[in-house]
Image (cartoon, rainbow, N blue to C red):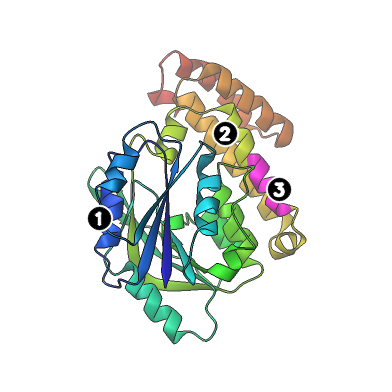
Amino acid sequence: MFSIIIPTYNRANHLPKAIESVLSQLFTDWELIIVDDGSTDNTSDVVASYNDPRIKYIYQENAERSAARNNGIRNANSEWICFLDSDDVYLNQHLAVFEKAINESANPRFLLSGCIREEAGEQNLYPLINLNNNVIEEIWTRFILANAVCIHRSIMLNHQFDLRFRIWEDTHLWTRLAVHYELQVLKDYTCKQIINPEGTVASGLSKVKILDVKQYLAAIKDVYQDEAVKKSISHDFYLAYLEQKLRMYLYQSRMNGQLGVALRIWFSYLTRFPRWFLVLEFPKIFLNALGIKKRTS
């Protein structure tokens, strides 16, 4: 019934937990497709150590996460597609909850469960999408993990991850799906995101890269060109969202002491959204680069 796709790159030390969380599922009608995106560690040996015919291993030359997920979709045999990041886990009722919801729904196509964030042993619940609000705005402002989605195979064959983007690529896809298919939100929390220093989110903020900033903004601008998306949200919300992301990267880069990066983001911010607070931000960039942070945060 379910094809679970795990894209992975040099995560052999984390991968066993992800695999074992699938093996522990209460609902057992699944296949697990692990797409190795050109790993140079012992990922293939880790996968080979599991003697279960439902686990499939695909190796590809490094082409980033979107390409790996799409490769998994093309090789999936099940009716429903699920995803799991290689350093995260499913709770044991994950598939059972989706199976129940699918059987009880009139025409399910795009489902979303709740996800838990775990960092340094502390757990917090990500807020669920509120379908009483604007759905696209909710998707953009809530953090929707690929771990928490379940999508019908017929949709995934026509709507895949955009290979141009390796940041915000998941939200780009959820947005495109939500303007064409009804999103069904389950109240159950069925998966867990485990934050570690090697993860995409943590590593991306610990050292901000200009290329990442450009990718992020480009992905947002690109999906907004879709007429269905443009009709679903206000232009003011779109501009405010772009500004919010620039502000996030500006703050993070200056707090990291990245002088050159922070200055480039500051100038980009100024040209797009001139604001008075940027006058105060300018000296803070230099103070933070000198290691003076407490008074300038």
| Residue drawn at point x = 62 percent, y = 37 percent | 215
Marks 2 and 3, Cα distance to the nearest angstrom? Answer: 15 Å
| Residue drawn at point x = 27 percent, y = 39 percent | 13
Q: Secondary structure at mark 3?
A: helix
Question: Are circles 1 and 2 on residues that touch, CB within 8 Å?
Answer: no
Q: Amino acid at mark 2?
A: Asp
Density class for disc 3 (Cα within 10 Å; few <14, some 14-19, many ≥20) is few
Q: Say if residue 5 shows up in the picture.
A: yes
Marks 1 and 2, Cα distance to the nearest angstrom? Answer: 39 Å
Marked residue nearer the N-terminal end (2 or 3):
2
Question: Are circles 3 and 1 on residues that touch, CB within 8 Å?
Answer: no
In the image, residue 89 lies at what x, y percent? 31, 55
Q: Secondary structure at mark 1?
A: loop
Residue tagged 2: 212
Q: Nearer the viewer, residue 186 or 265?
A: 186
As drawn, the label of residue 51 is: 1
Marks 3 and 1, Cα distance to the nearest angstrom? Answer: 43 Å
Q: Say if residue 134 shows up in the picture.
A: no
Q: Is residue 170 left or right of residue 194?
A: right
Q: Amino acid at mark 3?
A: Asp
Q: Nearer the viewer, residue 248 or 278?
A: 248
Locate the C terminus by quadrant: top left
- Residue 113 covered by magenta stretch: no
Q: Amino acid at mark 1?
A: Asn
Q: Is residue 191 left or right of residue 60?
A: left
| Residue 190 vertical position relative to residue 238 in the rendered view, above or below | below
Marked residue nearer the N-terminal end (3 or 1):
1
Marked residue nearer the N-terminal end (1 or 2):
1
As drawn, the label of residue 222 is: 3
Q: Which residues are magenta?
A: 217-224
